[in-house]
Image: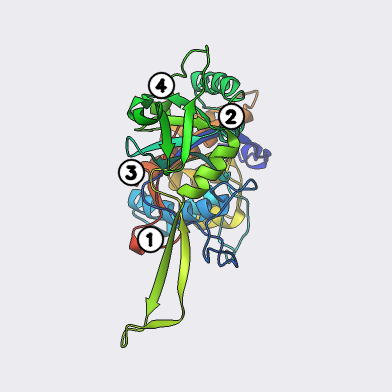
């Protein structure tokens, strides 16, 4: 093949965007360190006060999880580390600094399970939370068009919602308390009436899309903020002296958790990996950095197969060099490599703290 640098020197832009649903399999404590309020170790919150997972926390967890997944795939720890660098960027102490091929946005709250007087529990969301989902779906290149339309229609209905009312997706008969006129009672103190409307019921298929096994209540934004805050788990923990079983000085503190079964959503953006000179030389032992060595590096790391590498070369050998198509093939395979790594892990990773006491396990799936 020629020694061109068409692919190597092409500016790298995000070409594919996937929307991910995150399920908290266990309680989550993705914290912000110590605080001076009523809770010593609070969880991360977005600019509106709702629970969230910052992208930096997700990316750090991804790096750890993908290293194990790629080691199982490549059976070579050194190459697994290099593949993690290609996808998610190098560590600060690395010999060479370059940009990550995958960008991860903050994970926003979609729905939280809340204790109900009837039916044990249900999920709650609000127009504000659904609008944030809609914002992320606009970015996605793979989002279900029918789902986009369902969310849009649901928001038109939910925008007229009054305080103390709810819109139900699913069978809410199991939640209603007949003794008080069919109201739904959440957390023993939030009494909710059904919003009367002549509009058709929201599509129940949304429950399947969001992997919800219980009905979803859409509440007024002001109501859901209070309900969500009350539904968070706050535990007081104590550290004892082993010899006397008395409390250490400073050994009493309070932690905050997002309850298991909470749903978040995030977006991952994918672009062509940078042509890192040090990385390519380490993999191929070649000093000259051109399209050949770039493609060979990605092939050795498992991003490209022999067939897809050949396809990329063919695009670059045509009379009218199709660099954009060659780049698209690379990015698509890079996206598939990350999703293959997730499948190796059965889509589970650990984020946040306290994993040794059963916290922080989440499941990620492309919507």
**Label 1 belongs to which residue?**
355
* 164 versus 99 height, above or below: above
Q: Earlier in the sequence, mark 2 or mark 3?
A: 2
Q: Residues within 10 Å of mark 3 (few under 14, many from 20)?
A: few
Dot in front, 3 or 4? 4
* 153 versus 333 height, above or below: above
**Label 3 belongs to which residue?**
346
Does the residue at mark 1 contact the one at mark 3 (Cβ under 8 Å)?
no
Q: Earlier in the sequence, mark 1 or mark 3?
A: 3
Distance from disc 2 to disc 4, alpha carbons, whole Å, reads 18 Å
Q: Secondary structure at mark 3?
A: loop
Between residues 74 and 169, which one lies in front from this camera angle? 169
Does the residue at mark 3 contact the one at mark 4 (Cβ under 8 Å)?
no
Rendered image: mark on residue 204? 4
**Image side of residue 302 versus residue 53, left or right:** left
Does the residue at mark 2 contact the one at mark 3 (Cβ under 8 Å)?
no
Distance from disc 1 to disc 4, alpha carbons, whole Å, reads 35 Å
Distance from disc 3 to disc 4, alpha carbons, whole Å, reads 27 Å
Q: Position of residue 231 (x, y in %)?
A: 46, 48
**Image side of residue 323 versus residue 82, left or right:** right
Q: Earlier in the sequence, mark 2 or mark 4?
A: 2
Dot in front, 2 or 4? 4
Q: Residues within 10 Å of mark 1 (few under 14, many from 20)?
A: some
Question: Is residue 264 shown to the viewer in this render?
Answer: yes
For the N terminus, the quadrant is top right
Dot in front, 2 or 3? 2
Dot in front, 1 or 3? 1
Q: Position of residue 151 (x, y in %)?
A: 54, 23
**Label 2 belongs to which residue?**
134
Q: Position of residue 147 (x, y in %)?
A: 50, 22
């Amino acid at each position: 093949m020629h020694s061109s640098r068409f692919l190597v020197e092409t500016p790298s832009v995000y070409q594919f965007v996937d929307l991910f649903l995150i399920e908290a399999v266990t309680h989550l404590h993705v914290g912000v360190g110590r605080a001076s309020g009523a809770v010593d170790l609070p969880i991360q919150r977005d600019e509106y006060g709702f629970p969230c997972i910052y992208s930096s926390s997700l990316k750090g967890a991804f790096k750890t999880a993908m290293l194990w997944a790629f080691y199982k795939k490549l059976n070579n720890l050194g190459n697994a580390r290099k593949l993690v660098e290609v996808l998610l960027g190098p560590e600060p102490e690395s010999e060479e600094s370059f940009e990550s091929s995958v960008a991860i946005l903050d994970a926003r709250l979609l729905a939280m399970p809340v204790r109900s007087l009837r039916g044990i529990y249900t999920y709650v969301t609000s127009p504000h939370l659904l609008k944030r989902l809609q914002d992320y779906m606009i970015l996605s290149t793979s989002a279900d068009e029918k789902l986009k339309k369902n969310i849009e229609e649901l928001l038109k209905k939910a925008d007229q919602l009054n305080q103390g009312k709810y819109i139900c997706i699913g069978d809410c008969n199991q939640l209603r308390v007949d003794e008080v006129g069919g109201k739904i009672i959440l957390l023993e103190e939030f009494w909710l009436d059904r919003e009367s409307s002549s509009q058709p019921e929201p599509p129940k298929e949304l429950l399947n899309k969001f992997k919800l096994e219980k009905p979803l209540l859409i509440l007024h934004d002001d109501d859901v903020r209070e309900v969500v805050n009350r539904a968070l788990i706050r535990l007081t923990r104590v550290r004892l002296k082993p010899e006397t079983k008395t409390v250490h000085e400073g050994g009493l503190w309070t932690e905050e958790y997002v309850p298991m079964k909470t749903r978040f959503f995030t977006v991952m953006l994918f672009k062509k990996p940078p042509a890192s000179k040090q990385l390519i030389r380490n993999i191929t032992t070649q000093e000259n950095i051109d399209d050949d060595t770039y493609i060979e590096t990605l092939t050795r790391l498992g991003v490209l197969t022999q067939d897809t590498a050949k396809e990329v070369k063919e695009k670059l050998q045509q009379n009218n060099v199709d660099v954009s198509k060659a780049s698209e093939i690379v990015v698509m395979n890079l996206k598939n490599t990350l999703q293959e790594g997730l499948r190796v892990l059965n889509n589970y990773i650990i984020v946040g703290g306290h994993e040794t006491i059963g916290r922080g396990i989440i499941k990620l799936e492309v919507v």
